[in-house]
Amino acid sequence: MASLAEGDKHGYAMMLDIEAFAGVKLGPGTLYGAITRLEQQAWIKPVNSTDRRRPYTITPAGRGHLQEELAALNQVVKTGLTRLRHA
């Protein structure tokens, strides 16, 4: 979802973006499995396109869920960095 937070993308563009910002190379099966699960949760949805590629967009519910997840991760990072300073 973080890849879609800045704008609509099709699967291959998401794979490239995720690899660039997260350093994680996803295979098509992994990515499209995740896309299916995110669609089932109504966190992303396909966008109409005249191209053969199918772009996706993040929904308002998806944006809210992403914000919650990132806040939780941010807390983990803050705690870890604080504890590391005391080690």
Image (cartoon, rainbow, N blue to C red):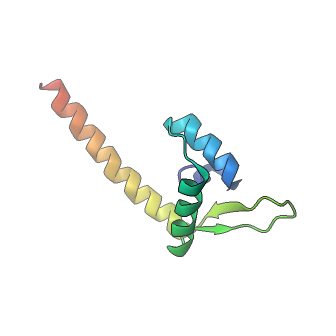
Query: Which residue occupies 57% across, 70% down?
Result: 39
Q: Toward the viewer: 15 or 84?
A: 15
**Quadrant location of the N terminus?**
bottom right
Residue 25 spot, x, y in % from top left = 54, 40
Nearer to the camera, 42 or 82: 42
Decide if residue 66 is on the left or right side of residue 84.
Answer: right
Residue at the extreme right of the image, as rendered: 50
Can residue 40 be seen at all in this image of the molecule?
A: yes
The C terminus - image quarter = top left
- The residue lying at 47 percent from left, 64 percent from top is 64
What residue is at 34 percent from the left and 48 percent from the top? 73
In this view, 63 is above or below 39:
above
Query: As drawn, is 47 to the left or to the right of 32?
Result: right
Foreground of the two, 64 or 32: 32
Image quadrant assignment for residue 16 = top right
Decide: is 47 above or below 2.
below
Give the image location of residue 31, x and y in percent.
57, 55
Residue depicted at 57% across the width and 48% down the height: 27
Instruction: Let me know if residue 43 appears in the view.
Output: no
Snapshot quadrant of residue 77: top left
Q: In the image, is 63 to the left or to the right of 76?
A: right
Residue 30: % across, % down: 53, 55
Vertically, is 74 above or below 52? above
- Relative image position of residue 74 (x, y in whole percent): 34, 45
